[in-house]
Amino acid sequence: MTFFMIKCACVYLSGIGFGLIVNLPHRALNIAGINATIGWLVYYWIFTTWGGLGAPNFFGGLVIGILSVMIARWKKMPSILFDVPGLVPLVPGGQAYNSIKNFALGDYQTAFNYLSEVVWIAGSIALGFIVAELVNKINQRIRRAQEKDE
Amino acid sequence: MADQQNNYDHLVINTCVLAGTIMIESGSEMTRVNDTVLRIARNAGLKDANIYATLTGIIVSGGTQDVGAQVGSIDKRVLDMEKVAKVNELSREYEAQKISINEFYDDLLHIDEQVAMFPLWVQLIGAGLVSGSLVVVFQNNLPDFGITFLVGMIGWAVLYFLNIYVQIRFLSEFIAAAVVASLAILAVKVGLGIKADDVIIGALMPLVPGIPLTNAVRDALSGNLISGPARGIEALISACALGFGVAIALHFF
């Protein structure tokens, strides 16, 4: 449990750290870190209950995509400020590294195994983003329709 | 009178081109660029304005006979999210008529003075935080937090200075990755770290082209088939440069 808390704190810190290196505006830093933490918590929850690679990353990407647009509307800033730091903890860094390492060591079988994992994870995150965009568009339509009614 | 209108239209088009250029340079996605530029033009009264934006250049046409179209070229790309936010903010202020088009143009010209990058030491701490905490998140390896923090900082510093002094694209990524991997392996050999692989994974994370990749996916999905694949290629080459750097270091140590 303690380790889980430490991990959450680390996710938050990684979001903020990434914000620092891509020069996020100061008032966006904290919320970007929180966004990253929420996205990762969703990922972790699904990862521990369902397992697998596709579903956790898909839902992580989906939640981050939807949340960032909501935050963007609230803070009146572009949504890209919030979703990129949010994605950092989901990036398949370990698998990508292992793939490269095994290529370098000449073990192509293992390398391709890891590479397909990387492609699968990246594809799931991207798909989550697409669905998030769809949800946001529907949301926008509903909003506009409501405004017209009023 | 017609002359005045002509001047005004020219100023609007210039503002649009400049705003678009700054946004693409700083790493914004294309839909946002198109949206912002068209909104500026429409708010300024150019109803039929049109834009064609790619990763390396931008064309904005006014839609009226006398102004024609303007071209802006984009040669450098740096990640600076605050500029994207700033242009967005200025465009909102213009829409709410808080600033005039003259002030808008002036602010865009001097955006470098208004928007400062974080100083190097803050960026270094940021890179360290990304590296250190991701070791814990990805590999469940808490003891290596400290050394990864340090190696990640050094890797970012190498990238930063190479980008300033050498200016060969993708070479800086390659060298930075090689330095990171060598340092990680050496640190473990000296006894400062526990698992060299974990340290390398963490310390490479700040160098990974995250924003270009997400933008590539987004641009391609929104139907911009020029910018999406172009960004994808850029991100892929940087990723390959990182991979080769690590591979070389692994080979030697």
Image: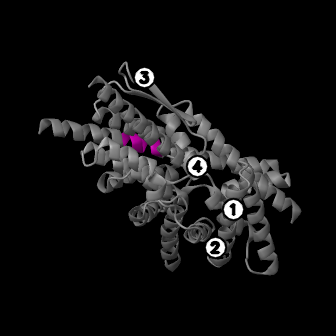
Q: CA distance from mark 2 to mark 4?
A: 26 Å
From the top left corner, tell me how far across and down residue A47 is, in percent: 51, 59
Disc assigned to residue B68: 3
Q: CA distance from mark 1 to mark 4?
A: 33 Å
Residue under label 1, please give it: B161
For the residues labelled 3 and 1, say whether their Cβ atoms are less than 8 Å apart: no
What is the three-letter code of the residue carrying label 3? Gly
* Secondary structure category for the residue under label 1: helix
Disc assigned to residue A62: none
* Secondary structure category for the residue under label 4: helix
**Magenta region: which residues?**
A129-135
- Horizontal side of B94 relative to B175 (left or right) equals left
Q: CA distance from mark 3 to mark 4?
A: 46 Å
Q: CA distance from mark 3 to mark 2?
A: 53 Å
Residue under label 4, please give it: A121
User: Which mark is first along the chain, 2 or 3?
Assistant: 3
Q: CA distance from mark 3 to mark 1?
A: 42 Å
Q: What's the residue at 73%, 60% (across, down)?
A: B176
What is the three-letter code of the residue carrying label 4? Ile
Q: Chain of mark 3?
A: B
- Horizontal side of B80 relative to A27 (left or right) equals right
From the top left corner, tell me how far across and down residue A37 is, in percent: 45, 64
What is the three-letter code of the residue carrying label 2? Phe
User: Which mark is first along the chain, 1 or 3?
Assistant: 3
From the top left corner, tell me how far across and down residue B100 is, in percent: 29, 44
- Horizontal side of A65 relative to B172 (left or right) equals left
Quick check: do tags 3 and 2 share a chain? yes
Residue under label 2, please give it: B149
From the top left corner, tell me how far across and down residue B55 is, in percent: 56, 37
**Residue A131 on the magenta span:** yes
* Secondary structure category for the residue under label 3: loop
